Amino acid sequence: MNLSLHPLILLLIFPGGLFLMNIGLLYEWIDRKLVARYQNRVGPRWFQPLADTIKLLAKEEIIPQGVHKGLFLALPVIAITGALTAAVYVPLFGFRAVYSFEGDLIVVLYLLSMMTLCIGLAGANTLSRFTIVGATRALTQMFSYEAPFLLALLGPAMAAGSWNIGKITAYASNNLWLILAQPIGFVVALVGLMGKLELPPFDAPEAETEIVAGALTEYSGRGLALFRIGKNVEFVVGITLVVLFYLGGIANPIEFILKTAGLLIVITALQSLFARLRIDQTVGLWWRLGALMALLQLLAIIIGKYLGEFLR
Amino acid sequence: MTDSPREKFIVPIGPQHPALKEPGNFEFTVDGEIVTDAAVRLGFVHRGIEKACETRNYTQDLYLLERVCGICSHIHATAFVLGVEKLAGVQAPPRAEAIRVLAAELERIHSHFLWLGVAAHEAGFDTLFMYTWRDREVVMDLLESLSGSRVHYSVNVLGGVKIDLSQKISDQIKKEMDFLEERTHYYMKVVTTDDTFIGRTRGIGKLSKERAELLGGVGPTVRASGVKRDVRVIAPYSGYKDFSIQVITDDEGDLEARFVVRIKELLEAYRFIRVVLDQLPPGELTTRIKRKIPEGEVISRVEAPRGELFYFIQSNGTEMPARVKVRTPSLCNWGTITDVAVGHKLADMPMLLVGIDPCFSCNDRMVEIKSQSTPSHIMSWESLRKYGIEYYK
C-alpha cells in the first residue's frame, strides 16, 4: 500500500514519528502484560507505559557529578533519533517505506545499533560503578549478537538478490515464507532481536539484582524517558523487520497486527522461559552456536542458489 | 594507561540495592567480571532486641523475640520457651510439643518456598519466582487458618501452645500437603533439568566439606556440602524426640546442591507433617508455669529453616531475664560467602549471597570496640536525639 501524504506528515506523525512512538508504548504494554500472564501475575493496565513515560518526562532530570554534561544530555536524543531514523527506511504497518534506496538494509541495521552504542557511552560517561559494568556488558553483548543477527538478515537479502528492504519484502511476500525456507536464519534473527533489545534472558547488561539498572542507572526524568521511547521504537522496527523478511511480508495494517502479535507471543514466551544468562554465557552462546548456525544457513542459501541455477 | 598499580574497582552491593531485601553491605573487588576480593559489612539494622528483652518479663519477651525475624518467627519463640521451660523445670504436654514442631515444619515450608523464589529472582528467572511465591500462599493460608495470622503465628506460650488442631484443619493441611508435594516435585525437576538455570547454579560457589566444617556454617548451606549438622537430629528437642526426621545432605556443595537440599527438605517436611497429624497425642495444651523463673542459665538450640538457632538465657530469679543472647544462623554462614566468592563472576555474587538464605536484621548485633587511642563515650538518649536532629538539620 502506498500513502500520498505530505512527506513531513509521513515522517513526523504517521506512520513515523508520533504514531510509531505510541505503537511502541502499546507493544511495551503487550510485552509486559503477556510476560506477566505467563508468570501468573496480573500485569499492568493498558495505559501504564504511557503513564510511565509522561511521569518521567515531567520529572526533574538529575545530572550527576563528574559526567560530561553535553554528552549526558545528548545521548538519549541521539539514541531515539537513531531508532526513529531507522524507521524511515522500513515499510511500517503495510505502507511503503518513507524513503528507500539500494542498500538501506545496512543503514537500518547500523541505525538500530546506535541505541546500544549510546547506552554503552552513557554508561561509560558516568562515574558510577554499576553504569561502567553495565556499559561494558552492553557493548560486549553487542559484539556478540550483532554479527549473527546481521548474517540472519543477510539470508533473505541474498535470496532476494538485493540490499533494498522494499525489494526483499516483495520477494518474501511473493515466494514461500522464508521461515520455512530458512528456519535457522529465522531463529537466529528472532533471538538476535531479543539480544539487541536486552530482553530476558539476555538482560545481563541491565541485570537489576547485580548492577541495579546497568548503564542507565544514573539516568532519570527526561533522559530515561527518551531512552525508553527509543527502545520501544527499536522494538517495533526490529519486529517489523523480522516479520517482513521471514513471515511473508506485510501487505496491510491488519496483516501487520496479526503477524507482529504472533511474533510477540513467541518472544514473550521465550522471555519467561529462561533464567538470565551471564555475560560470558551470552558471548559463548552467540559465537559458538549463533554465529555457526547463521553461517550454516548462509552456506545452505549459497548452495541452494547455485543448485537452483545449475538445475535450471 | 599508566604503569602505576591498578586501582581497585569495587562494586558495592548494598546497603541499598535491588538484590537485597534488607540492608547489608558487600564490597566485591572485581577485575573485569571476575571477583578478586569480597568483604561483608553488617550492622545497618541493629534493633537492640536483646537489650529490650531485659526490661520486659518473660511473657512479653516471647512476643518481642517472635519479631526478631519475619520469616522464622515461630522458631525464635520456640527456642526461647524451650529455654525458659528448662530453667523453670517445666515440661510442656506432648500434644503441645507436637503442635510446636508441626508449626515449625509449616514455617520451614514457607521459608524454603520463599528462598526458592528469591534465589530464582537473583538468577533472573522470574517465572520460577512468581510460581513458588504463588504456591507459598497455600502454606501461608494454612498458617492463618491454624493460628489467625500469616506471619507472626504466636503459637507458643510459656508452658505449652495456645492453638489446637481440629479434625477439619488437620484434613485441610493433609490435602494441601498433597498439592504442595506435587508442586515441589515439579520445582525439583525445574532446578535440576533447566539448562539456563543449571548454567547459573551447577559448580558455582562450591564449598568443600572441610571448609564448611572449618567455617562453622550451619543449616542447609553446609548440609549441601555433606556436613550432617541438624539440631533436630543430633540433639532432638521438643516434638522431635517423639517424631524422627531425616537429615538431608548432598555432596556437591555448589548452589545447585543447596537447591536440591532445600527442596528435599520440603518433601521431608510434608512426610513429617503427615506423620505428626496422624499420631497427634491427645491431652492438655499447656502446663502452669510461674511468673518468676528460678535463677540459672540455659542454652537452647533449635533448627531454624536457615540452620541452627542458638539462645542463651540467664535468669536472676525475677520476672525478667538478666540476659538473652540470640545467635541466628545467618551470622554463622557469612564466612562461607567470602570464602568461595573469589574467582567467580560478578553475576554469580547475588546468587551466592542469597545461597545462604541470609536474614540481615536478625543477625545484626552491636559491637563495642574498646580502643586506647579513641576513647568511646556513651550517649544518653537525650543527647543522642539532639545529635540526630543537629546532624540532619
Image (cartoon, grey):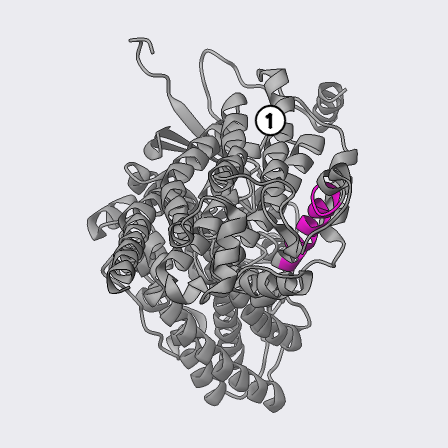
Q: Is residue A16 magenta?
A: yes
Tell me which residue sits at (37%, 17%) in the image: B7
Above or below, comparing residue A278 to residue B261 in the picture: above
Task: Write down the quadrant of residue B371 in the picture.
Answer: top left
Above or below, comparing residue A70 to residue A173 in the picture: above
> What range is drawn magenta here?
A14-30
Residue A178, percent across and down? Answer: 43, 62
Tell me which residue sits at (58%, 42%) in the image: A89
Tell me which residue sits at (37%, 21%) in the image: B8
Q: Is residue B85 visible?
A: no
Above or below, comparing residue A211 to residue B384 in the picture: below
Tell me which residue sits at (70%, 58%) in the image: A44
Residue B391, percent across and down? Answer: 71, 20
Q: Is residue A4 visible?
A: yes
Quick one: which residue is furthest to the left in this view?
B210
Question: Mark 1 = which residue?
Answer: A75
